[in-house]
Amino acid sequence: MKSIKQLTIIVAIILSAVVIIPVYGDDDHGNSKIIPTTEAPSLVMDAAKKAVPGIKITSTEKEKNDNKTIYEIKGNVANKEYEIKISSQGKVLKTEVETNEDDDDDWDDEENIKLSDVPVKIKKAVIKIIPGIKLTEAEIKIKDLVKIYELEGRVKNYDYEIKITLEGKILKIEKEKSGFFTRLFDSIF
């Protein structure tokens, strides 16, 4: 009986998505706005230039997350693309550089693996840096005989993607708010 009720709810949600999606769109981008660089506070721009010396800024976005204003500064220097997230107080929250390592076609080998096959020390390193994370997927990537684990997980309304070495060194963490339907299905099931 419970599965019939759940199936009915799922069908109703999918059918109503035709109406909901055009009206509300993707809620991940609803709080972000591209702004002219001149509209960003000077202390934010100074922090970006200090974080990545010589950066040529290509775009600036202003985001509202959890009632906090965050600026996302994108630019390049020495043929590398940078993305810097900075608080309105000028604190650098995250700096990412786009490298060939992020190119999924550039790996010698990739393989989805079971979460149970991820070494305990890797899981502990991730939990230490992201308390409360529930890991959902794991993949191992190999390039030039170097293994990188790519783990996905969730804490509350946020999805994470973590790249970590076999030694437990975090290479990259991406965090984004879960989509509307993911949060809805999680609340039902």
Image (spheres, rainbow, N blue to C red):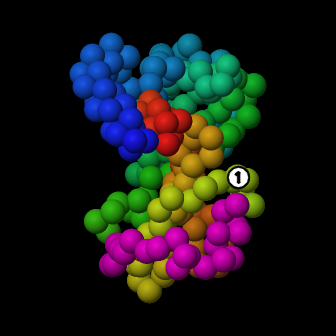
Please indicate whether residue 124 sits to the left or right of residue 16 in the image: right
Nearest the eye: 101 or 156: 156
Give 69 or 35, whichever is nearer the viewer. Answer: 69
Q: Which amino acid type is marked by label 1?
A: Gly
Give the labeled residue for mark 1.
132
Q: Is residue 89 magenta?
A: no
Does 182 sit above or below residue 127? above
Q: Evaluate whether residue 169 shows in this view.
A: no
Q: Is residue 164 above or below residue 54?
A: below
Q: Residues within 10 Å of mark 1 (few under 14, many from 20)?
A: few
Residue at the spot 70% in from the left edge and 61% down from the top edge: 127
The residue located at (49%, 79%) in the rendering is 147
Q: Is residue 173 shown above or below 117?
A: above
The part of the chain drawn in magenta is 107-127
Q: Report the number of discs.
A: 1
SS category of the residue bearing label 1: loop
